[in-house]
Image (tube, rainbow, N blue to C red):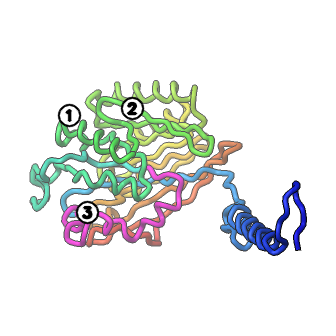
Amino acid sequence: MLFWHGGMPINRNIFRISFLIAVVFTAAVCFFVFPGKEHKSPRASYVKNYVQILFIGDTMFDRGVRYYAQKNGGNDFIFEKIDKVLKDNDLVVANLEGPITGNKSVSSGTIPGSNNNYLFTFDPSWAKTLFDNNIKIVDLGNNHILNFGRDGLAQTKDYLDGAGVGYFGAADYPKSTSTEIGGIKITFVSYNEFSELGAELEQKSVLEEIEKAKGFSDVVIVFCHWGAEYVGPDQAMRNLGRQFIDAGAGLVIGSHSHVIGPMETYKEKRIYYSLGNFIFDQYFSEDVRRSLGIIVKINKKTKEFQFQEKNFYMNSNGQTIEKTYRK
């Protein structure tokens, strides 16, 4: 039987087949473009009302850490037990305790206490490893960043730039770095007690940087490399940390002592004097093996902070693990 459409005769069977094809095609499109509830990810309609940043302590990839990585198939071995913890955050910020260069290691195999034992350089592959493990901003303001001179620093910047890892606190510039996450503008400022400027000029420079950053940032966080090794803060450190808060910092994070330091609340702001070692080849005591990670949740609307502490522990095979221990 024929019927007419637009003045042309069309066979009814052909029409039926064409109609069915159209229906099936439409259903398929709707399925993939507008999937039913059972196909949605549980988080698909969930939007976080906060930004989550994890701060970790001293991170070093030479000497024993280099040895264990090479022995066990590469860099990923070192992060194998903690990669998920790192990737569960919007960003991880660490102290990078030395330069990334193409130079040969001079500290590997040396005797503790010898001169070369404290000269660090990290293989260029570590820049990508940092990025892959969500450590996308590092503080370069420490006493080891110039172990291979200005050339070592220049190489470090090049490798970090190539891997997409941000940095701040370098011996020359920049003193700070800013990023925007979830609509929150965050500026990280470095204080390096061991800067070539000397302590007085370094402190003045950091206070000026905080003041400047306040003008265009929702949050200013100071990452400090300060104090003496293996001991807690003295009164001068406490006074300086409070000065940074008075100047406008919303949080102060410390490193360098290789052991966990105390936390102080000052004017409703927190100062963590030291997070201890995160990845390092120091295993001579429980204190140097233990590390503190600080998760900071910043409310997108109020910019208020909530804190969660993570306990890490350095195994003697080079790996860092998450571990609960008595304080």
The location of residue 235, given as percent across then percent down, is 42, 41
Mark on residue 282? 3
| Chain part drawn in magenta | 65-93
Amino acid, disc 2? Lys
Crowding at mark 2 (Cα within 10 Å: few <14, some 14-19, many 20+): many
Mark 2 or 3 closer to N-term? 2
What residue is at 17 percent from the left and 50 percent from the top? 118
User: Which residue in the protein does label 1 denote?
Assistant: 150
| Marks 2/3: CA–CA distance | 29 Å
Circle 2 SS class: loop
Of tags 2 and 3, the one toward the viewer is 2
| Marks 3/1: CA–CA distance | 27 Å
Residues tagged 2 and 1 counted as in contact (Cβ below 8 A) = no
The location of residue 120, given as percent across then percent down, is 19, 50
Circle 3 SS class: loop
Q: Is residue 312 left or right of residue 153?
A: right
Q: Is residue 327 left or right of residue 257?
A: right
Q: Is residue 252 left or right of residue 38?
A: left
What residue is at 49 percent from the left and 30 percent from the top? 210
Residue nearest the observer in this picture, 54 or 202: 54
Circle 1 SS class: helix
User: Which residue in the protein does label 2 denote?
Assistant: 175
Q: How many marks?
A: 3
Amino acid, disc 3? Gln
Crowding at mark 3 (Cα within 10 Å: few <14, some 14-19, many 20+): some
Residue 12, picture quadrant: bottom right
Q: Is residue 284 visible?
A: no
The location of residue 314, given as percent across then percent down, is 33, 67
Residue 256 forms part of the magenta stretch:
no
Amino acid, disc 1? Arg
